[in-house]
Structures are given as C-alpha cells and as structure tokens.
Amino acid sequence: MSEVTSQEYLDLLGIVRGYERSRAVTVAAQLGVADLLRDGPRDVASLAAATGSHGPTLYRLLRALAAIGVFAEDDDGRFALTAMGEYLRRDHPLSVDPAARMFGADDEWRAWGDLPHTVRTGETAAEHALGMDVWEYRRQHPEQGELFDAAMRTFSRADSARLVVGHDFGRYGCLADVGGGTGAVLAAVLAAYPGVRGVLADQEHVVAGAPAVLHDWPDDDAVRILHTARDALGPEGRVLVVDAVVGPPGEDPLTKFLDLMMLVSNGGRERTAPEWRVVFERAGLRLVDTVPVGATRHLMEAVAV
C-alpha cells in the first residue's frame, strides 16, 4: 500500500537538495549575470556571449533560478533582475555576490564535505580538509580573502542601521572597534553620533573588512579577548559585544546553522544567553543588557566587576 506524499516529505526532500539552489546561485554570481542585467532584460544569446557560456545550458541555469525568484523570465526567453536578484549585483551596497562566491568556493565545499569528521572528532573540518586553518588559507589564496572581506562588509552594513538605533552610543567619549575591518560599523555609529571619537583596531594587513569577532574563537580564547578589553576599561567604560545569541530549542535556524558554519570553518561557536554570561563572568565582566540588532546578532553590554 503506497503512502500519500505529505508536505513534510516534500519539505525534507527540498532540504536534502538545497545545495543545488545554492550552487546555481554561486555559478550565476561567478558569471556576473546580475551585473549584465543591470540595465534591463537580455536574451540568453547575448548573456552567453558576454559570459563565455554555452547558450542552451546557460538558459537552463537561469530558467531554474527564475523559478525560485532570483531572476524573471518572460515569454520570449529573456531574463531580468527581480527584487531579490538585485542583491547579486556587485555594485549593490548590500551585495550578496561575494557571499555567494565565497560559500560556493572549493575550500568551503571541501570543508563541509568533512563535516562527518568534525561530528565524529570535534575537530575543525576546514583544517582537516585544507591542511591549515582558514586564516592561513586565505593568506595563501588572497582572492578568497578578498571575497571574505567583501562578504563581511555586506553583513556589517546590513546590521548597521539596527545597531545604531539599538544602543545609545552618544554616552561614550571614545569608542574602540576591535576587529572592525575597514570600519563600516564604526563609520555608521560615528555618523549618527558625531560627538563620539572612534578608534579602529585590526590586523595590519586588514585593509578590507576581515573582522575577528568572538564567535571566531572557542571559549578560552574568547575569555582572553574579553579580559584584555576589561583591563583597558576606564571607571565608566563598557565592553560592547556584537555577536549571535542562540535561540531556544526548535527555533532560530539561522543562528544554529551559523554555529555549524563556525564549527566547520574555524572551530568557533555561537552561544546561548547562559553560555555568554559564563564567558563574561570568566573574564571579570557582568552582562547588563542584551539587544537584538540583526537577523543573527545581538549587542551585549558588560561592565567590569
């Protein structure tokens, strides 16, 4: 007796095949299709000529992406950008293009392919797959470092508006952004609070947004970083951490899959609210406020104890 196909079956099958959609978006980003459609619809022949692609095959790729809303296809087989597809343009201030190319790059595929190793051992998948940590890999492959930097700039811009209104930065005389890349977030805060002086701190070679935030590190390293920040505080100083807070059971898939990404990529992690309190306490800090400032980010304010 055959079973009726349920929505749950279809949903699970969609999840199993989810990488197909991701890979298709990555290829469209690598070809720069969204930039070619910036000025209006184009037919496949012209897109194939501009991208050096095989026309009939490119059509099948774009047709599939149009079916999920990335592009729009008309009755004449021409393609145009949708509201979603606009974010694939490389000149868009919130361009998803670098993230699409970064997450679809060979090193990411190899690292995620080693997820079984990580689950069995607790070791970082990327180090096992690449033979080095991701920071060294990006140093040796600067094109991947540039994609990472560009993706981080997009993520920072996406959260900046909520961050600026989510906390009163005007009460500080000086604000130091540690691991702030090229300062996209700091610039947004200073524009909103012109009376505040800003200090940007990052590695010397960082010229385009390669941040080192606390989710990049296991607990002992995070405690060390926070303890150093605590020691630098004046009497009225505050440590502000912008990072993810894992939601309750059965909720918050964005943060929980971000946690898996950190596990695969560099051995970092996302933390629940109780886990964050423990980390702050170990660093001699007391958490006094937590405010959501993005899809996966919270601003946590702590004081020395």
Image (cartoon, rainbow, N blue to C red):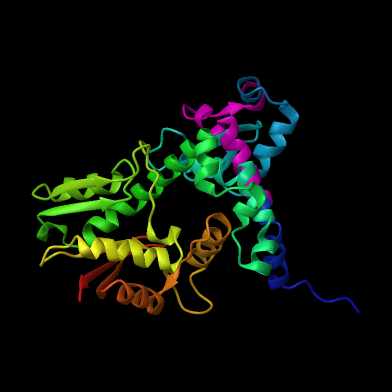
Quadrant of the rendered image containing residue 299: bottom left
Left or right placement of residue 3 versus residue 279 in this view:
right
Compared with residue 275, is residue 218 higher up or lower down, i.e. above or below?
above
Visible in this render: residue 72?
yes
Comparing 235 with 150, the one in front is: 235
Q: Main secondary structure of the magenta part?
A: helix
Q: What residue appears at the point 43 percent right and 71 percent down from the top-left corner?
A: 271
Magenta residues, start to end? 20-46
Comparing 136 with 155, the one in front is: 136
Residue 43's spot in the image, x, y percent?
A: 62, 26
- Give the tally of numbered discs: 0
Q: What residue appears at the point 43 percent right and 68 percent down from the top-left corner?
A: 219
* Quarter the N terminus occupies: bottom right
Visible in this render: residue 244?
no
Compared with residue 50, is residue 92 higher up or lower down, i.e. above or below?
below
Q: What residue appears at the point 26 percent right and 74 percent down from the top-left corner?
A: 284
Left or right placement of residue 257 versus residue 194 in this view:
right
Left or right placement of residue 100 versus residue 208 in this view:
right
Residue 278's spot in the image, x, y percent?
A: 36, 78
Comparing 66 with 208, the one in front is: 208
Q: What residue appears at the point 61 percent right and 67 percent down from the top-left corner?
A: 122
Residue 166 among those drawn in magenta: no
Residue 48's spot in the image, x, y percent?
A: 66, 24
Comparing 32 with 47, the one in front is: 32
Left or right placement of residue 15 versus residue 220 in this view:
right
Residue 39 among those drawn in magenta: yes
Residue 206's spot in the image, x, y percent?
A: 37, 39
